[in-house]
Image (cartoon, rainbow, N blue to C red):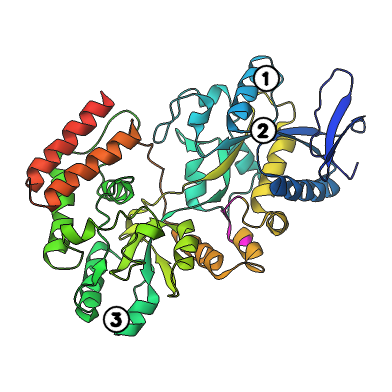
Amino acid sequence: MKRIMLLLAVFAIAGSVVFAGGNSQTTQTAAAAPGTSVVRWSFWGAESRLKAVQQAIDVFTERTGIVVAGEPAPGTNEHFDKFRTQFAGGMAVDIVQVGGDFSNFGISDQINKAPGIEDLLLPLDSYVKSGVLDISKVDAAAVQAGTRSGILYALPVATNMPALMYNKSLLERVGAPMPNVSMTWAEFDAWLRQVQAKLPAGVYAMTDNGATVTGSVFFGYWCGDNGTDMWDGTQTHLTAADVQKYFDMWAKWRNDGLIPPAGVAADYAETSEATSSLIAGKTAVMQTWSNQITGYSNATPDDLELIELPNAAVGNRLWGQMSQMMAINKNSKNPQAAVQFLSYYINDPVVWGFLGTSYGIPVTPAGRAAILANADDSTKKQAGYLDVAGKHAGPRNPNMPSDTEWNAGLFLIYQNVAYGKITSAQGAQQVMDLINRLTK
């Protein structure tokens, strides 16, 4: 059976199969040939992705004879509700699209552990050991994203990572040195000072990314690199002394003129290219996410590039913001065939020739190479960055409880320290009080 129809519902009753061809939908009666492995896969996605997925499935089936029956859901909530209901009844799909983390199953997803995940999903380590699942070329960040309690349960299809973005054209215009992709904190500090020495008055080497009204990414990264995780799902590893150290780092950069004064920084919310001091020509480098280089590049004629956050190559505390992890139902009737498809889908560049960047940037060098043939400049920069940063990742910290309130609270405290309304020591204690209140 070479052509596998996308909306194939494989049930023991009636042998009725629903499938989609192009934009039309038809109901027929069909059955896999005797002895053929049938793997059911539940996921969601736009129509363009569904067509690309079908093409990838067809190639896999032609090679292996394994039937992959796709069961798209109309949305994420429906997808997970359906899986939980069918799992309880013993009729869940073999392969399930997980999303960005395991909390979508209604369980607590903590750093390095997700209690209850072992009751739902199949451990994959034995398949890695036997060679059925190849993770030898998968980014470390991607493997970490699907690992809990030292056990691999899932792999993401694509990824996005924290990064620093700098204005290469600005540095060229003023004769400032270009940065290395990987730098220690000391090297990064020295580079900022070299850049600042070349910039005109009123332009600063670094955006003030100590905290923004909607984000605490730089703080979270610094905490992990400092060995004091902000939140691991059960507790914080920070002390007031640690937070003060962080505030003092930014205060020194501010006092030395490497970042804008508080009053100038306040003019830029740093939530998008529309509110960016870098796009406004006021700063040379900023913290962002790797995929955001596209929007920022579209907002300026200047050439923008990506580098790692300081010390990433030493501490390995970057993380991947994963796109659509895939896992196997613990009770799958065809686990080996399901794992075979997972390995193919993650690793084979043929798949990415069909998918392009519909999921994001692939988690393997071969996948990234496959999308480059027709990629625009921003996509090539993202892929190149992930080739480096993907090797320097650790587990992704869970978000702080009441994440929106946390970001807003940290931002307010950070601003009060920046304006000199409170000392860094006082601000640090207020941050600890905020964490304790949100996590009690």
Counting residues from the start of the chain, the first of labels 3 and 1 encountered is 1
The residue pinned by badge 1 equals 86
User: Count of labels shown?
Assistant: 3
Counting residues from the start of the chain, the first of labels 3 and 2 encountered is 2
Q: Quadrant of the C terminus?
A: top left
Counting residues from the start of the chain, the first of labels 1 and 2 encountered is 2
Residue 299 locus on image (x, y percent): 45, 66
Residue at 64 percent of width and 15 percent of height: 88
- In front of the other: 414 or 182: 414
Amino acid under disc 1? Gln
Report the span colored magenta: 359-366
Amino acid under disc 2? Pro
Element type at mark 1: helix
| Measured Cα–Cα span from mark 3 to mark 1 | 60 Å
Q: Residue 74 shows which numbered tag?
A: 2
Residue at 85 percent of width and 17 percent of height: 13
Viewer can see residue 72 = yes
Residue 349 locus on image (x, y percent): 69, 58
The residue pinned by badge 3 equals 176
Residue at 12 percent of width and 37 percent of height: 429
In the image, residue 380 above or below residue 215 = below
Residue 29 lies left or right of residue 188; in this view the side is right
- Residue 362: within the magenta? yes
